[in-house]
Amino acid sequence: MSGFPLESRAILGSTLVHPTVPLISVGLGTCGIGNGASDLFEALKKAVDGSGIQIKKAGCFGFCAEEPLVMLYYPEKPILLFTQVQAKDAKRLVKALESPAALDRAAKSARGKISTWDFRTLRVEFGSAWPEVPQWNEIPFFSGQEKFILRDCGLIDPENIDEYLGIGGYGALFKALSTMKSQDIIDEITQAGLRGRGGAGFPTGIKWNLLKNNQGERKYLICNADEGDPGAYMNRNEIESDPHMLIEGMLLGAYATGADHGFIYVRAEYPLAVERLKIAIDQARKAGLLGDRILGYPFSFDLELVCGAGAFVCGEETALIASAEGKAGRPMPRPPFPAQKGYLGYPTDINNVETWCNVPVIVSRGAQYFRTIGTEKSPGTKVFSLVGKVKNTGLVELPLGTPLNSILYGMGEGTGSRKRIRAVQTGGPSGGCIPDFQFQTAVDYESLTALGAIMGSGGMVVMDQDNCMVDVAKYFLSFTASESCGKCAPCREGTSQMLRILNDITTGKASMKDLEELEQLAYTVKDSSLCALGQTAANPVLTTLKYFRSEYEKHIVEKRCTAGVCESLFEALCENSCPLHMNIPGYLALLSEDRIEDAYELTLRDNPLPGTMGRICHFHCQMRCRRDSIDEPVAQGEIHRYLADTMAKLGRDSAIWNRLAQEKKSDTGKRIAIVGAGPAGLAAAFYLVRLGHQVEVYESHPKAGGILRYGIPAYRLPKDILDHELGLWKRLGVQFKFNWRLGKDGTLDSLKSQYDAVILALGAQGDRKLGVPGEDLPGVHPGYEWLEAFAQGKIKKVGNRSLVIGGGNVAIDTARTLFRLGSEVTVAYRRTRADMGANSQELSGAEDEGIRFEYMIQPEEIIGGPKGVTGVRFRVMKAGGIDESGRPKPVPTDRVMEIPCDDVFVAVGEKVQSEMIAQGGYKVERDGRIVTDHLTGRIQGNLYAIGDAVTGPATAAEAMGLGKSVARSVDQALMSRSVFTDLYIPYDYPKEIPLEPSTHPMGRPKLVPPEERRGNFQEIALGFSGEQAKIEAERCLRCDVRPNAMSPWR
Amino acid sequence: MNTTVSVTIDHTSVEVPSGTTILKACEQAGITIPTLCHLEGVCSNASCGVCVVEIQGAKSLVRSCVQGVAPNMNILTHSQRVMSARKTAVELLLANHPADCQSCSRNGTCELQDMAELLGIRERRFPRTRAPALPDLSGWGIVRDNDKCILCGRCVAVCREMQTVSAIDFTGRGIRTKVAPFMNYPLAESPCVSCGQCTLVCPTGALTERDETDEVFKLLYDPDKVVVVQTAPAIRASIGEALGMESGALVTGKMVAALRRLGFKYVFDTQFTADLTIMEEGSELIQRLTTGGKLPMITSCSPGWINFIETFYPQLTDHLSTCKSPQQMFGAVAKSYWAEKMGIDPAKIVVVSIMPCTAKKFEAKRPEMRSAWQWWNEKGRALEPLYDVDVALTTRELARMIRRVGIDFERLPLENFDDPLGKSTGAATIFANTGGVMEAAVRTAYELVTGKPLENLELTALRGYEYIKTATLDLNGTSLNVAVAHTLKNARVILDQIAAGNSPYAFVEIMTCPGGCVGGGGQPLGPSQSKIEQRQASIYQEDRNLPIRKSHENPDIQALYGEFLGKPLGHLSHQLLHTVYKRKEKVET
């Protein structure tokens, strides 16, 4: 840049960015400091003292989840990036820079390296080394990112103007002043297609032209840095890490539009941004970059800071202007637009921080270059703050047009747990909630708007299955309602009424009419509010209503919050997670008082198979147990097994069964047929018969129990336990018709005409196929079908070498059964052990028994001939990026392997066999699931469906839960009454929170040793002793002890 | 630029001047768009959301009150979307508005009530989401009931723009937003001057005059009391309007008849003491002019104005004439001179005044306004403390009383005021208009100074609606610069000149309200300049009708001086008719 007056300082600056001595730089943005970067910086300063190693403050590199970040630079070598560095690591890091050899050793623990860096105004080669260390943009979080706005962040010292000059900063200004006319700049911006990054996406060039063409004694430029949405902090970091980029952008805007005054309206809650801006403005002024005759050219512009007190509405431009003028921040009607009459009545242009930051590079490299990034309609990049239930939180900058999937699973790497991402909220409280089935959407202005969300300033809040979408809408609306300036009636009153309805929904007080009202209000508030705050306030409600309406309905009709967030709708998280809504704290408390009989009876009223389920349940309750945050969950399931076993042993359970039989409601005269005697059908029968209906259960097998009997091997669930518990149904008077097949022994139509209601509980027993050659060979067995055949005594012998393909419970059950039959068993799974669907106890049990596991292999062909199978050829897989299930996606490698075997058991999932239902003219999903009304379970008329046939393969508890809730709705439909709660009786048990949590670890039942398991099917788990059960019960933290604890079931 | 644009309103093409708002364009096209916050010339806050219309191609509905027309705009004023939004906006406002229409003083005159009716609202669809608020009863003139406030912003606009008082503003955010004085102080502790302009523009019962009609009825029914009434000059040109007659209907005789039928024992006229004011004030001006007193001298009849200068320009109160207002002079004279003359126990006399003004209620309760009581005390007659004026009613309250007892106002005969406090001149009548006090004073001062009769009584230079009017009068060779201003925004202009030391005037008249007392805060609701101008015209008509048009020619005034006061600015005048204005203090309520 010949003639650049600040060239000598730029040269000095470039040696600071790319020095000839070793350098340590520490990311000192707000998030880094919050994670201890200041202490680290001090420790490093002490450690480098006298060593000749330079140390500097830098801005933030964006990887918030891994703060503090440190970069080590040794001349002629790549920069090494270290994450999660603490003050105690200081000496080690300094030592690493003492010699190239030390650095080579340190490189092994580096997270990544930077060999070259494109500052957009200058490209720097740092050096090359360490092929085993990934380049920074090979780290998943940075992969796919495009650092355009954040190009300098984390690499330069934001408090030293020389470094900004050193990487080519203010070069665009010099270029503009020395070679361009003001209109040239506007033309360049217009051609670049730059759109407002505040969220609305208005073309910046048009805005600037308006200001340029408006005459005024003065003209103002304003930078809107009033970033107020919860979860958004990109503007803060842009200022904190690279303030001169913003100043240069505004200078270029001033030159282009003829503005002579400007200010940055920044919220006072950003003290570090304010401080760094002050320093930057001061340095720019001293360097002749602000004030009169900038760089010696006839161009003057001065810049000030205005601190806002942090009202969200002040992000709206007319409110911002009012606030800057010293008035209350209330929007004014437009027109007049700020370009006509803005700050103090003068023509004014307002742009967002990020919009300004784009300008220097566009001027420096040209519009065409800018257009190579992003899409046709939305060129360039956008910075998002990725927060919430995502593993890699931080700032991501991506080319517009990047699909959400790549952001959430690629850069974010999913939730970081087994939980699934349900939705993402873009644009903060003014934005919308995008559901997982829309994650293929490309992020740009138009497509987000089409979904009902907005780009907004760039907040991206990720939500998983533990987030209640009604609560999410309520949260955002409570924000906008309280941040509404209160001026216009639709926004002030409308948001307040919407919030009232949402409060009612989340506390179980709303009706379906309220839901209609909510929706209508949302549209009115959107349509007739004065400013953008009100016009967008309803978006979170409208989008959640659009995509998660059933969740609203569940809250209203079932008074149920599945995610376990709306506290007024459940007793405790365990109770809420239990598909049967067992009053778990209740029976734990009763057991603590030695009231075993009461505890059993309470359990039985919620779950008629306590002994069975206590053995085989998935224990949904434990997944949300709060005790887990101290050590491990309470073993609630073991306890109800203990209660059932004890009562059975004492022979006292039948007295309670009799009591239930005696209190049956008087005969309603209604007859109900249930097809299927699995867990779902049994649960429905249990409740319906107690409600006074005559219940007949049709079952194709010779005995009741379904999967409990025919799918689950006896070493997990001894059949005498099941047989004993089924005695309850007989006692209640449920009639069973066994060996009866739908279609063969009777039709749906005949059942429908004979009974007042017909409930299908068909299960999901169809084995899925692999779809590879050789699947039809003899010796290839569908997993579930084989287990069922075995349970019925149809299997006598197995081969010596068995290969089970799959990772779910059926796979493990098959493997462990084969092991007991004497076969040598291998399980092959295409993902890793951590990604397996099977219960972890079952998995480790199988491992204990010596079953072999092969991971990351996918079958390609089953090998063999007419005589049978000889082996299976597998493709070896490797882990790719995180997929939508939140697990690393298996990606094929070029390697294959073969496993020899005599039998292959394919257990890769089950499906619903509903062909007959579909033929009857009823709607089924593509995978066979029967379509029902999600609130009542009704298919049509008097026909209902429950269990796996509706949900697809699920747990026995989930099947029973659906059976229970549909029993309630069938009774309501037949009798026009609501008496379900009569089936419960209140128990008086202590409602006290333990003063100190019990110090006992989670109790574990005694197990039969693995060496004693081969060749027999005796039960492995021996259950709790009485003492163990009591100690375990006392581990409960009693989350149910609170005033609003209520279960809709009791 | 006198161009026009062509727009389509409800499928009909209309030509309107460019720059017209959609609301006005619709009006031209024969469509009335309802609004609750918009008030021409007062407030364009765009807050209520009722005036929305649909514009083809626009993302959301637009507010017709502020949005200008654009060429080829296609406007729909009553599409389903529009009507639903309008209705919902009003239903939302009703949610947090008390359902007490029957007991509200604005029952029948409430714009919210009318709007609910207009939009066919038949149920209260939404429940309350805001905690009920208690009324602020601290101000003597004005009662604020935030519970009824719909936050339209008209009062805030009028207080800030017209009066530059800003006693009230929006506070809080979201549903907690309210209109309140600084730091939620009670109105009495705010800079509020009690002018009552806010009560004229308030669409609901959130801002009203303190209703004292029940108090007056009680006094009228009390056999131990002698209740006398005085009526301000402006009332005769507005009470008819308040009772349903045309704007500005001049009904002096019927008004007297109605008051007599209501049971007032003596019906007097504040105009009598307006004449007295001219005698005192004219003399004071001459005294200041001749003895080097503080100039300019500023009139002191308008109590809102007095509150304003005491609050905002306390250093300039020396410029005020020390004369009490005619209302207070009347009370003092009635309970001293007249009581003695009639031989009535002053403790039994109740003075009720009918005023166009809410600030008069406040003025009557100023602690120093007890001169008659002090006068009796000095005479050795110990009395319980009594105010010179007991109750000041507004035009609106009087109209309510007349309606309540069932008087058919329009069929009343014309009756005359009682003597001696009922006789007045045309000079006193024009006190009701901006410029009137000045004109009346000049009629007398000219003759007192020059000794010559004034040929042209009507000072047209000081008439009309213009906010600041100035004139140079020739008083026997000396020229006298005078100025007249109405509304407090314009008072500020005059005061700032005085404060800066470059005021060219010797005599200034200031009235608080637009157009003078005819536009007072106690006048009929629904203010508009044209209504005020009609009232002004009637007042000038009354002036021309009266046989005597100069205060000093009023024979009963002459008798008052002869029998009782002696001379203007004499000892008794000072005791009964003059006062000292000082920094505003909190009043006992």
Image: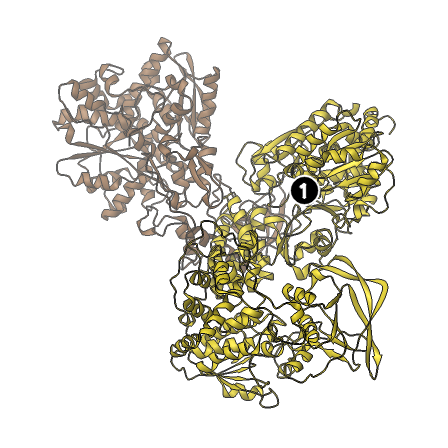
Q: Is residue B64 left or right of residue B537?
A: right
**Whole-percent x, y for residue A416 in the image:** 67, 54
Hey, which quadrant is residue A228 in on the image? top right
**Whole-percent x, y for residue A787 in the image:** 67, 78
Residue labelled with disc 1: A234
Hey, which quadrant is residue A777 in on the image? bottom right
- A54 over A467 or under it: above or below: above
Q: Is residue B392 left or right of residue A202?
A: left
- Residue type at tag 1: Met
Q: What element does badge 1 sit on?
A: helix
- A279 over A833 or under it: above or below: above
Q: Is residue A117 left or right of residue B577?
A: right
Which residue occupies 45% across, 40% down?
A: B154
Seen from the viewer's position, the closer of residues B71 and A711 is A711
Is residue A104 visible to us here? yes
Mark 1 surroundings: few (<14), some (14-19) or many (≥20) residues within 10 A: many
Which residue occupies 66% across, 52% down?
A: A390
Q: Colour of chain B?
A: brown
Seen from the viewer's position, the closer of residues B557 and A491 is A491
Q: Chain of mark 1?
A: A
**Whole-percent x, y for residue A760 in the image:** 56, 80
Q: Colour of chain A?
A: yellow
Tell me which colouring the rendered structure shows.
by chain
Which residue occupies 27% across, 15% down?
A: B569
Q: Is residue A176 left or right of residue A987?
A: right
Looking at this view, name the residue that lies furthest to the front: A1012
